[in-house]
Amino acid sequence: RALEACGARGDLAGSAESALAMAAGHDYAAVLIDQMLPGMDGLELCRRLRRGGLGAPAVIMSARDDLAGEIGPAGADGYLV
């Protein structure tokens, strides 16, 4: 809703697996990933998106404030606590 209020369009995936499927068919300008997904966590999702060719900026959202050392190796561009 916040994206739409700013004039942007967003897609919502209910799981990491559905996010991977959605990303395969789209060229996103940016990706916002929740760290605490059921099953596969957000860092692994980001790794797989990067291996799949995602070139858009990827930002991880997390309640954890200690991810700084983990986001780079996962391919994320930043994170929000």
Image (cartoon, helix red, strand yellow):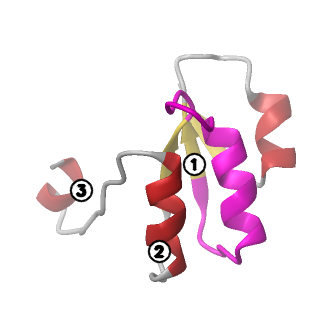
Q: CA distance from mark 3 to mark 2?
A: 13 Å
Q: Secondary structure at mark 2?
A: loop
The residue at 54%/63% (across/down) is: 20
Residue labelled with disc 3? 3
Q: Residues within 10 Å of mark 2 (few under 14, many from 20)?
A: few
The percent coordinates of residue 32 (x first, y second) are 48, 50
Up-down relation of residue 63 to residue 68 (above or below): above
The percent coordinates of residue 68 (x first, y second) are 77, 30
Report whether 13 appears left or right of 53.
left
The percent coordinates of residue 30 (x first, y second) are 49, 65
Residue 76 in view (yes/no)? no
Instruction: Give the magenta-colored segment's residue range.
Output: 35-58
Between disc 3 and disc 2, whose residue precedes? 3
The amino acid type found where label 1 is placed reads: Val
Q: CA distance from mark 2 to mark 1?
A: 12 Å
Residue labelled with disc 2? 29
Residue labelled with disc 1? 59
Q: Determine if the magenta segment contains residue 7.
A: no
Residue 80 in view (yes/no)? yes
The amino acid type found where label 3 is placed reads: Leu
Q: Determine if the magenta segment contains residue 56.
A: yes
Residue 34, numbered label: none
Q: Secondary structure at mark 1?
A: strand
Q: CA distance from mark 1 to mark 3?
A: 15 Å
Q: Residues within 10 Å of mark 1 (few under 14, many from 20)?
A: many
Between disc 1 and disc 3, whose residue precedes? 3
- Whether the residues at callouts 2 and 1 have beta carbons within 8 Å, the answer is no
Q: Quadrant of residue 40?
A: top right
Between disc 2 and disc 1, whose residue precedes? 2
- Whether the residues at callouts 1 and 3 have beta carbons within 8 Å, the answer is no
The residue at 71%/44% (across/down) is: 44
